[in-house]
Structure formats: C-alpha cells, structure tokens
Amino acid sequence: MDIKGRVALPKHQRDRLEKDGIRDLVVTVDPDGCLAIYPAPLWDEIEAKVMALPGTNKYARVLQRLYVGFATDIELDTAGRMLLPTELRNRTNIDRKVVLIGQGKKLELWDERTWEDRSDNWEQAVADAEPGTMPHGLEDISF
C-alpha cells in the first residue's frame, strides 16, 4: 500500500473485473479483522440479504452494523488502484504491508502481520480437525 492508502489490484484481478465492465467496488470491515472487497453489483445482493435479517437477532444486528455500516463505495483509478478510507484501514490495523487474497467473488485485504498470525492458526485448525466436523458438502471435495 502506498503512503496515500492506495492498493493496486493485481493485473489478473483487474482483467476479471474489466471483462465484466466493473470499476466500482465496495469495501467493508470483515469480522475476522480484514477488509472485504466486493464488486458493487455483488455487494448490492449481499447488502439486501444482510438487511433482510431480523433486527431482533443480536448476531444479525452486529452483521448489519459492521458489514453495512462500514460499507464504502470505491472506484478503481486509471492505474487499477483502490483508495482505501483511513477509517477502515485504522479499524483493521492495515498499514503499508498488506496481503490481498481472492475469496471466490470477493477479495480480502489483510495487514501482513495479522495475516501471518491468523493463517498459521487456520492451517493448524484444519490439520487438527476431527472427522465429521466438515460442513455438509465439503466431504466430497478433494483438496
């Protein structure tokens, strides 16, 4: 990330977005401590689903406040960079060294140190998982 808070998308990610005519993105805080970055059309669907959750459910309210409350529209500049709001960077401790990972239809942006700490734990959790703890549908996927 540069001094102004801009992160350049890798060329293959830009190409995928440009192929679909997408330049507008939405970035928001993820409960795991990173920034989640969505193409704007996909975000519209997610926002509608999150806001349709019952407001009387405490977990639903937390998701609504976090995901929707911090959602910020951003546009890729001509160099394929995203300008990340200071408030979101500060909230997730994102500084100069970052890790950008693809997660299907969205991207996650992590502070490098946080990513290293958390990803080590995830790898160990998978290795230590008890048989039968995989969510339904994952049993048949070979990694």
Image (cartoon, rainbow, N blue to C red):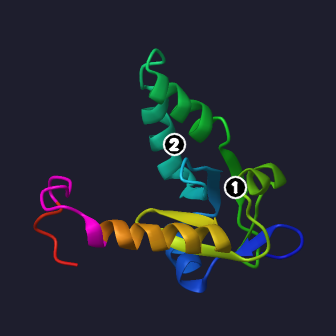
Give the left or right position of residue 88, taking residue 39 as reference.
Answer: right
**Residue 86 position by quadrant:** bottom right
* Residue 33 is covered by the magenta coloring: no
Secondary structure mainly formed by the magenta segment = loop
Does residue 103 show up?
no
Query: Which stretch did the figure color magenta?
Result: 127-137
Q: Where is residue 37 drawn, in percent x and y?
A: 58, 58
Q: Can residue 19 be seen at all in this image of the molecule?
A: yes
Q: Amino acid at mark 2?
A: Asp
On the image, the x and y values in percent for residue 68 come to 60, 37
Q: Quadrant of the N terminus?
A: bottom right
Seen in the picture, residue 15 relative to 51 is either above or below; the reply is below
Instruction: Point out which mark residue 92 bears.
Output: 1
- What's under tag 1, amino acid-wise? Thr
Q: Where is residue 84? Give x, y as percent.
A: 76, 60
Question: Outermost residue toward the bottom?
Answer: 11
Residue at x 15% of width, y 57% of height: 137
Q: What is the crowding at mark 2: few (fewer than 14 residues within 10 Å), some, or many (at least 20)?
A: few
- Which mark, by number, is residue 44? 2
Q: Nearer the viewer, mark 1 or mark 2?
A: 1
- Does residue 128 appear to the left or right of 7 in the view shown? left
Give the mark nearer the N terminus: 1 vs 2: 2
Q: Nearer the viewer, residue 127 or 22?
A: 127
Q: Which sits in the foreground, 13 or 30? A: 30
